[in-house]
Amino acid sequence: MDTSLLREILPVKGQVLEHFGETDWSFFSRQPRAVLFPHSQEEITSVLSLANENNWNCMPAGNGTWLEGCMNTDREVNLIVSMSKMNNILVHEPDNLFVELEAGVTLEQLQVTLRPSKQWLPLDPPGKNSSTMGAIIATSSCGALQTGFGRPRDHVLGATLITGDGKTLKLGGKTVKNVAGFDLLKLLSGSWGRFGVITKLIMRLHPLPEADRTLLFSSNQAHSGTSLAHDIMHTPATLQSISILSPGLREELDSENTGVAVRILESEAAVDQVEALILERTDLLPCKRLNGSESEAFFESLKNTDTDSDVVIRIKCLPSIMKNLIHQIEALQSLVADDSLGGLQFLAHYESGILLVLIDKLKLDDDWLAQSAETLKEFRDTVEQQGGSLTLLFAPEALLKEVTPWGSLDELETLCAGLEKVFDPNQILSRSSAHRSAE
Amino acid sequence: MESLPKNLARDLKNIVGSKWVLTDRDRLLAYESDGLTAYRSIPLAVVLPESTSQVSNVFKLLSQNGIKVVPRGAGTGLSGGALAEPTSVIIGTSRMNTILELDADNRRAVVQPGVINARLSEVASPFGLYYAPDPASQSACTIGGNVAENSGGPHCLKYGVTSRYVTGLTIVTYEGQVLQLGGLGRERGSYDLVGVFVGSEGCFGIATEVEVKLLPKPEAVQTLLAIFDRIEDAGRAVTSIMARGLLPAALEIVDGATIRAVEASVFAGGYPADANAALVVEFDGIEEGLGADVQKAVSDCNNSGATEVRSAATSEERQKLWQGRKKAFGAMGRIATDLLVQDATVPRSKLPEVLLKISEIGDRYDLNIANVFHAGDGNLHPNILFDRSDSEELEKVELASTEIMKLCVAAGGTITGEHGVGHDKKSYMPLVYGIEEMKAMKKVKTVFDPHHGMNPGKVLPADI
């Protein structure tokens, strides 16, 4: 691969990185041939055109915090196109509650900019706030706040996409209501960069709530974690988060029992009333109350729960079957190393039907791979039989290869492959990070 | 007039029952247009299936015979999206009107596409739940139609449009393939196929089962009506309310022409007949929180020049305050024989200047334009009143509509906020999209509908 061609397109020093340490931009112990840091849409268009001509596999990225995410482990990546240098907030119109930004802007940078206008983007993807907005949308990453505010796709009003074949598409607009043409914008969220490089985003903003309160409950014999969450979900009020935490997951909660954390974002006048309604539903079970920055910090810490886990599994299910599934994750105990300190833990966002299962340290004995893969496949079957789905978010490369990140897409395979060809006819992007279990 | 080949009519009757295949001209007349009556065309036939499998079999038969298909719900659409050419067959969903599942525990429902929007909320009500998207036609329009159009409504300001509430779909493609997209309880690792299907205006396939998310009914509701001498002042009040961080459930403006039409009709709501604008502001949520929000909104209205601010103390009073807004379209019939309900959006801070310019356009073309709109999300509905039999006036309506669309796009908005492109606005698509965007849309349609048998001639200009 002749990287001198890239230097003609990206002449500024540091825009093409070829000699980097293993920890910088490697994934699964492999390294791309080059990492590019374009400063403009034109540069990205040129890079993708060149990649098409030379049949180079590319992977769009932000700050490179999750390069292994749902990778097809069989594919090599020649180029990583990082958006980290395109990090300007272009327009913020507080009166119209939207912001237009380059995709390399981090969530933290955005929230700091919005705060003086008493506005925010209510997204809390897992991990640090150094994730870029483009990556958050491309991976559809969200956390506890999705209960009250929806998924990333619900916050995107518009986007600019450079497709795999170097075309610039401006999708959506600046207004919340917009049904002009087919909604291609929705396809970007959760596309994992397979349709192109997202270069700009227009995001819908929300007023910062006056009051931020978290109520922390511990389960007991009369109230299991899921029954508490169920009762709280049916409080006649909109709650922003209802999370269930396995015993010992957070020090603020009882280490012996399952915890339930409820977040209320309301006006000062309403927050006490919402709390009273919740307590009525929970038979006045005692709870710990966190207000303001304490409440915010608690949920911020939940975002980083999975940082050091060897394996992270994401289960999606209806809230009503979560109780069963929480019992059934015991089946995964056999994968945990004997000397693991964290063991097997879980974090659930009840109303959203998201159950994250965390294996702190995998047991790596002689037959670990075959046994782990078999156990995970069986567990995926168990989840699917109950109408849910299982995604392997993080795992060692060999295990990911055996189990695959997602289950089978069956009859949707043709549609998904067809969509990839619309935006990336030569598959320079969709080759490098397969969405699907089989190609 | 074209007619359906006899053997095909027989085979269709074998699938859905002879009663449910309409081929008589008299009966087809009811399907010659949707809510946009400016365009009319009698379809080849209308088929009314009752299940996914019947739809699949009907589609297989029609696609094998090269006959194109136009899906239709209640026919309340306002963009000619359900208009069928004389060679196309309409597939009506009126018999597919069953609520298949109401799962209060998981706050979800699964419905057939012909279920009336308002009925879903009625059935969910005893469980303390409701379906949030509330288009003005919600007492007649169907959930399937809402999916096709990605419908909005007054309360979408706070709660969002249809796409936020549709979590799963069963669809049938033109070739008769049945596909399950999404589902509240699972993520299949596919792209957001539900998201791209919602709002596809019947051009990708037809939804035969729709899974939706339900919300808890708000504990309390408070409604205000502010009266203004100038519509620009009402627009400024909207900007002030939103800018201070309040999030009302609805913010709706009715202009003077509309007020006078409503007050002279059986729908009179007691608005001052000499007012030039009325702003309906509604808050919902926890009772304790509403009072402070309402006071702030009253203050914003007064500071923006309101001559009067009324509040509703009872449910009956609330209905009355909404009367002028909800019955506006019905009352227009008093003023003119025909009505073109336009639909466009602008960033809300642009409302005052855009409203002034729309008024100037009306004056220039000597047309009556009445404005009733979702001010909170900048979704304008300039209603152009005209007489269809007057060809000169019809031409002026076309020209004025085009100017209004250009005006809204130039202000940073778009050509439709909730009615869809359909047949009516295809020619405006180049105002908001370049060739590449429209080509990409066509290619995505081709992925779902490779033979282009679904709802031909809609959304994209013919030369794309």
Image (tube, coloured by chain):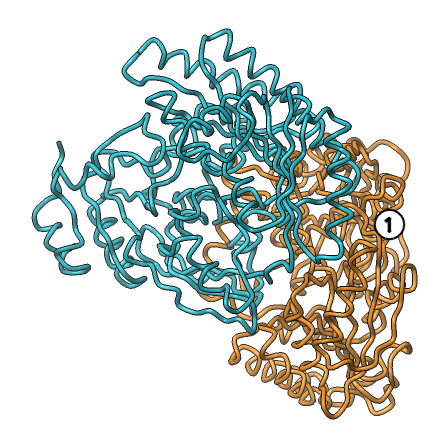
Give the total number of marks visible in the rendering.
Answer: 1
Residue for badge 1: A108
Left or right: B188 in relation to A269: left
Q: Residue at x 51, y 29 (%)?
A: B381
Please tell me how crowded label 1 is: few (under 14), some (14-19), or many (20+) other residues with Cα within 10 Å: some
Q: Give the amino acid at mark 1.
A: Glu
Indicate the position of residue B212 as horizontal and vertical percent values: 50, 60
Looking at the image, which is closer to me, A365 or B73? B73
Indicate the position of residue B72 as horizontal and vertical percent values: 32, 45
* Chain bearing mark 1: A
Which picture quadrant has residue A37? Answer: top right
Left or right: B324 in relation to B29: right
Q: In this view, does A379 lie above or below B343?
A: below
Looking at the image, which is closer to me, B415 or A164? B415
- Quadrant of the snapshot with the C terminus of chain B: top left
Q: In this view, does A264 lie above or below A191?
A: below
Looking at the image, which is closer to me, A16 or B212? B212
Q: In this view, does A72 lie above or below A198?
A: below
Indicate the position of residue A226 as horizontal and vertical percent values: 68, 81
Which picture quadrant has residue A123? Answer: bottom right
Q: Which residue is drawn at 83% across and 55% down?
A: A268
Q: Which residue is drawn at 50% across and 6% down?
A: B364
Looking at the image, which is closer to me, A414 or A170? A170
- Say whether residue A161 is visible: no
> What colour do you see for chain B?
cyan
> What colour do you see for chain A?
orange
